[in-house]
Image: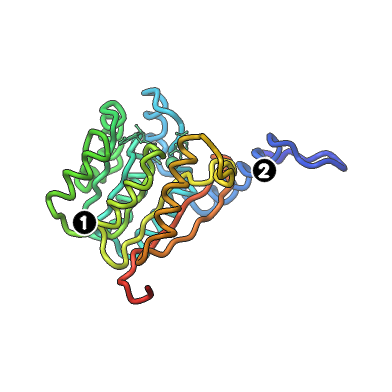
Amino acid sequence: MTMTPTGPGRPPTPEENQATWTAVDDYFCQALIPGDEAMDEAQRSSAAAGLPAISVSAAQGKLLHLLARSIGARRILEVGTLGGYSTIWLARAIRSPGVLITLELDPRHAQVARGNVDRAGVGDLVDIRIGPAAESLAALAGTRPQPFDFVFIDADKTSNALYFDYAVRLGRPGTVIVVDNVVRSGRVADSTSRDQAVRGVHDLVSTLAASKGVDATAIQTVGTKGYDGFILALVGDGSRD
Ligand code: SAH
Ligand code: DHB
Ligand code: MG
């Protein structure tokens, strides 16, 4: 990817900004994220099956992977599977013995993801549950499972607060929770926004602001996927309240 030089004496256009962000992602990814046939195939087969190209980027996938690995995660919960690209990054972080449960509304997405995680060699670790995540989470909570160490929330943005609430309930002190797509090209700063996805972030942030026992930050990002960001939260043990 070649850089687009900006013209003299004028600010870069949005297209030029995006070209720069993509070039920088390409530069770091080529150096730090070796080509991986299973990952590439997951993206190819998802595109071929007509799934939207909205997975995390390679750089973001590797961040999730490193975060999960750095806490020695054995039990990972993901809300929003799509074709399983982020699923593979996270499953490859699991310290054995472990499991990744991922929740997906669309059976077609789940079917594509099943093929992708199997081809990537992590099929035995990954349990894909089909249906509205709110229902799958209620059912999961009903089984009183062992706590999850890491949770990635990346489904319908309107239900962010509900999913986060479940993530805390299904976690333990020390559980790390990441919520994708909380910036949306800056639209999150518009407190009067009627965009349902932005409202979903506002609901989540209000919940977080009021919640004792969960510490969080939000990081804005640019890259191949444009301008967005994520929330990183840590479930506490109450000792800092
Ligand atoms: N985490 C994936 C991308 C997920 S895209 C990756 O980075 O590779 C969001 C996914 O959430 C889509 O597949 C969509 O079908 C799913 N989704 C939307 N609404 C949902 C719901 N109510 N319950 C579960 N999944 C949902
Ligand atoms: C969308 C969803 C995502 O999870 C994402 O990372 C980017 C875009 C979307 O629904 O547009
Ligand atoms: Mg996302």
Residue at 35% from the left image edge and 50% from the top image edge? 152
Does residue 224 appear anywhere in the picture? no
Q: Quadrant of the N terminus?
A: top right
The crowding category of the residue bearing disc 1, from other C-alpha atoms within 10 Å (few below 14, some 14 to 19, many at least 20), is some
Residue 201 has which mark?
none
**What's the residue at 54%, 41% (across, down)?**
184
Residue 151 drawn at (x, y percent): 32, 53
Which residue carries the number 1 mark?
Answer: 98
Q: Could you tell me the amino acid type at mark 1?
A: Gly
Relative placement, left or right, of 145 versus 148 is: left
Residue, far left: 143
* Disc 2 secondary structure class: helix
51 horizontally vs 31: left or right: left
The numbered mark at residue 20 is: 2
Residue with the most extreme bottom position: 239
Query: Looking at the image, which is closer to me, 40 or 194?
Result: 194
Q: In the rendered image, which quarter is residue 116 located in?
A: top left
Residue 186 drawn at (x, y percent): 59, 44
Residue type highlighted by circle 2: Thr
Sequence-earlier tag: 2 or 1:
2
Tell how many labels: 2
* Real-space Cα separation, disc 2 to disc 1, in angstroms: 39 Å
Regarding mark 1 in the picture, which secondary structure is present there? loop
